[in-house]
Image: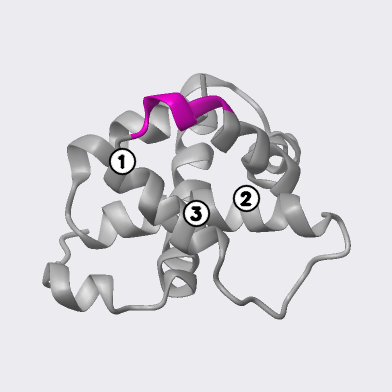
Amino acid sequence: MEQETKSEIELNTTSPLVWAYVGDAVYELYVREQLVKNTKLKPHKLHIETIKYVKASAQADILEKIKPELTLEELEIVRRARNSENHHLPKSADVMEYRLATALEGLIGYLYLNGQEKRLNEILKMCTK
């Protein structure tokens, strides 16, 4: 799917929750693709395995694991997404896990919307190691 990227100014003035909204979809699609490519699981088992990567607690752990590999600019994106005012909290995660998961999704969404495919792919690979 080809996309038209926003200008850096437009993207930087977009809510980090919008970045996370897009990042959630990009990340889940990446995880699903990897599982389909690398396993022979049936759909229900694919779903169960996908959840292991996309639930908030897993994303929080992943973000902590990859933080040392992030640039200062990426850490700032993570900080902005983590600190965004979000009034929705799932029942399955505590507040800090959810904020960290939002931060990871925000970073992924930002890179996707900014057209930084190479770096996005590097980070997605780090997330699923």
The numbered mark, 1 or 2, whose residue comes first in the sequence reads: 1
Q: Position of residue 115 (x, y in %)?
A: 17, 54
Say whether marks 1 and 3 touch (CB < 8 Å): no
- Residue that carries the numbered disc 1 in the rendered image: 72
Question: Is the residue marked by circle 2 packed among few (<14), some (14-19), or many (20+) residues within 10 Å?
Answer: many
Residue 12 position in % (x across, y down)? 26, 71
Distance CA(mark 1)–CA(mark 3): 17 Å
* Residue on which the image places disc 3: 105
Q: Quadrant of residue 91?
A: bottom right
| Magenta-tinted stretch | 65-70
Residue 59 lies, with reference to residue 94, above or below; the image says above
- The residue depicted at 74 percent of the width and 43 percent of the height is 57
Residue at x-position 15% and y-position 60%: 2
Which label belongs to residue 100? Answer: 2
Residue 25 appearing in the image = no
* Left or right, 2 with reference to 75: left
Which amino acid type is shown beneath numbered disc 1?
Answer: Leu
Dominant secondary structure of the magenta stretch?
Answer: helix
* Looking at the image, residue 120 lies above or below residue 115: above
Q: Secondary structure at mark 1?
A: helix
